[in-house]
Amino acid sequence: MYTRIDGKEVSASVRNAITEKVNDLKAKGVTPGLAVIIVGNDPASRVYVNNKKKGCEQTGMNSFEYALPEETTTEELISLIEKLNGEKDVHGILCQLPVPKHIDEEKVLNTISPDKDVDAFHPVNCGKVMTGDYTFAPCTPAGMVEMLKYYNIPVAGKHCVIIGRSNIVGKPMAMLMLKENATVTVCHSRTENLAEITKQADILVAAVGRPKFVTADMVKDGAVVLDVGINRMEDGKLCGDVDFDAVCEKTSYITPVPGGVGPMTITMLLKNTLAAAENTF
Ligand code: NAD
């Protein structure tokens, strides 16, 4: 028998705690505010931005949307961010990715003040995650750690295998799991004998971006499986990186897609926005 980790339940519990703290700050005259920048008309980005705004509203924070046309230049975007860096009511700034191809994404992300970089993408904040002493936790990995804690799943001393080495999921997840005293292995597209390694995992994290990539023969009996993947299938349905139906019976805990890791990411963004506002005192 396995437990299906309920990301919506964990998320609701964290959001309740955030709302209480937002109310405390409001009583002191400060309302946490998040500036959300979206460039162009990508429908998926629009959904994410709407959900971020909804999250702010639900927890009592302000959100400020800046919807810019597709043809916005890097310079125009940078000058908006520089303006927001100086605004007192804006505690967090995020630029929804991906930006159109002609925009220099790295330059844009590096312009966001590290004190307002609630996505934790700025090199300063990436560096802080590396040292383990940070204000802004990388949202998707932090969401997974929060889920492990909510379900009292032991991490210290366990072998955590992460498939994927991206800057926003795989690498920061490795840092957070090290901070929790796990033994960490990071696998990627050039890893040899992948299944031999994943079969050793007490906690297996899949962040590959390929539907049903993790099959039952890659999972140890009793493993905890966290599925980061969000893959849109031809029928429009979402599918994770794990073949859930084939794998679930082997696991002790597993996250579904949708309803697992996904709901946690925006919640951790809200938590970072709260932290940014608290930091101004
Ligand atoms: P990415 O494309 O940047 O990285 C994918 C990683 O998978 C790479 O490091 C690559 O080395 C590895 N990989 C590719 N093929 C492999 C193979 N055959 N064997 C082993 N490793 C392989 O993707 P990402 O940004 O880390 O996102 C991964 C998935 O997670 C995507 O589906 C994305 O949509 C999803 N995602 C979800 C959330 C969330 O909130 N739940 C957040 C970010 C990303």
Image (spheres, rainbow, N blue to C red):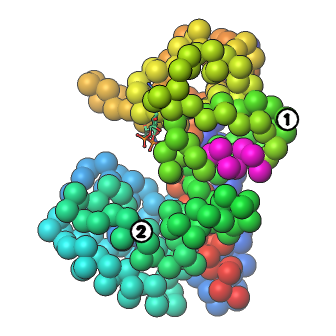
- The N terminus appears in which quarter of the rendering? top right
Residue position for label 1: 157
As drawn, the residue found furthest toward the left would be 71
26 or 277: nearer the eye? 277
- Say whether residue 70 is left or right of residue 162: left
**Magenta stretch encompasses residue 86:** no
- Residue 224 seen by the camera: no
Residue 110 image offset from top left, x and y in percent: 43, 72
**Residue 170 position by quadrant:** top right
Question: Who's the residue at 29% across and 30% down the image?
Answer: 236
- Say whether residue 123 is left or right of residue 17: left
Q: Which residues are drawn in magenta?
A: 173-179
Question: Who's the residue at 42% across and 77% down the image?
Answer: 111
Question: Who's the residue at 55% across and 75% down the image?
Answer: 114
Question: Who's the residue at 31% across and 84% down the image?
Answer: 79
Ranked by sequence position, the earlier of labels 2 and 1 is: 2
Residue 27 image offset from top left, x and y in percent: 70, 85
- Say whether residue 140 is left or right of residue 52: right
Residue position for label 2: 109
Q: Quadrant of ligand 1?
A: top left
Element under disc 2: helix
The number of callouts visible is 2
**Magenta stretch encompasses residue 175:** yes
71 or 21: nearer the eye? 71
Disc 2 marks a residue whose amino acid type is Leu
Residue 108 image offset from top left, x and y in percent: 36, 71
